[in-house]
Amino acid sequence: EIPRPVLPAGVRLFCGAGAAPCLTAQFVEAGLMLRPWHGAAGHAALSLRLPPLEDVLARSRHLLDGAVVNCSDVPGSPPMASWCLLIARRSGKGSAIRISLAELPESFANSSSVETHASVPVVSNSEIQVNLLDPEDARRKFPRPAQASVVALHVDARQGWLWVLFSTGRLEAWTLLAENAQQVGRWFVTWPGSQETAVPGFAPHSLCRLTMPSDGGGVLVLGKSSTSGSPALLRLAVGL
């Protein structure tokens, strides 16, 4: 748990597995402002600016996630840095999810010699086309109309996977650390909504993959009741 005064509302935390550094990300007019994260200290004197994100950040800021990965795990040309930032973001109202890869300066972890407001070089951009009219969504007829929308994204740093949650309860996993992104899993979730449940009309907002063996696996989904507005945290058992 991170105290709110340390991580203010609207600031996201992008981390990696193992010894990878953590970054805070905040939306600014030019795109994203990134800062090194120093644990409980929660502040840094220097910052890096990601080049402007040209799409709909103002309308769907929650539909963006990122993770720090080892650049050597990224296929393609030899990396010029040790750590890379992998960012996934929803692109407008269409079916595209944009994937960007940025190389982080070597001195970013300790911030002792990073130039303030230096640009983070984006080395690659790609897109994943998700299916908003999945036949299974239409068969289940939830919600009406059958066309789905993306409600949450999560980038798993340990596996380099992108998790996509749709309004219809469809959950997809895509591998990003490959020459071409590939779907590796798909599930259909029925949200609690009957009179026997304590979370009527559950509306999902965000998700997180549990990757540590001690966590027991699965996916956590944070949302709220569409009737009472009460927050709720659900755990999905997904097997891969």
Image (cartoon, grey):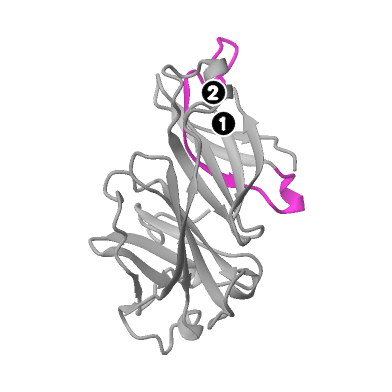
* Residue identifier under label 2: 137
Q: Amino acid at mark 2?
A: Asp
* Residue identifier under label 1: 170
> Counting other residues with Cα less than 10 Å from the Cα at mark 2, is it few (<14), some (14-19), or many (20 or more)?
many
Residue 64 position, x and y percent, is 42, 51
| Of residues 185 and 14, the one drawn nearer to the viewer in this rendering | 185
Residue 118 position, x and y percent, is 33, 80
SS type, badge 1? strand
Residue 135 position, x and y percent, is 56, 23
In this picture, which residue range is highlighted in magenta? 191-217
| Image vertical order of residue 188 relative to residue 97, above or below | above
Q: Residue at x 34, y 39 (%)?
A: 93
- Report which quarter residue 203 is drawn in: top left
The answer to the question of whether label 2 and label 1 lie on touching residues, with beta carbons closer than 8 A, is yes
- Report which quarter residue 186 is drawn in: top right
Q: Residue at x 70, y 35 (%)?
A: 237
Query: Is residue 88 part of the magenta span, yes or no?
Result: no
Q: Amino acid at mark 1?
A: Arg
The quadrant in which the C terminus is found is top right
Mark 2 and mark 1: Cα distance apart in space: 8 Å
| Image vertical order of residue 14 relative to residue 72, above or below | above
| Image vertical order of residue 234 relative to residue 159, above or below | above
| Of residues 235 and 61, the one drawn nearer to the viewer in this rendering | 61
In the image, taking residue 148 as reference, residue 26 lies left or right, namely: left
Mark positioned earlier in the residue sequence (2 or 1): 2
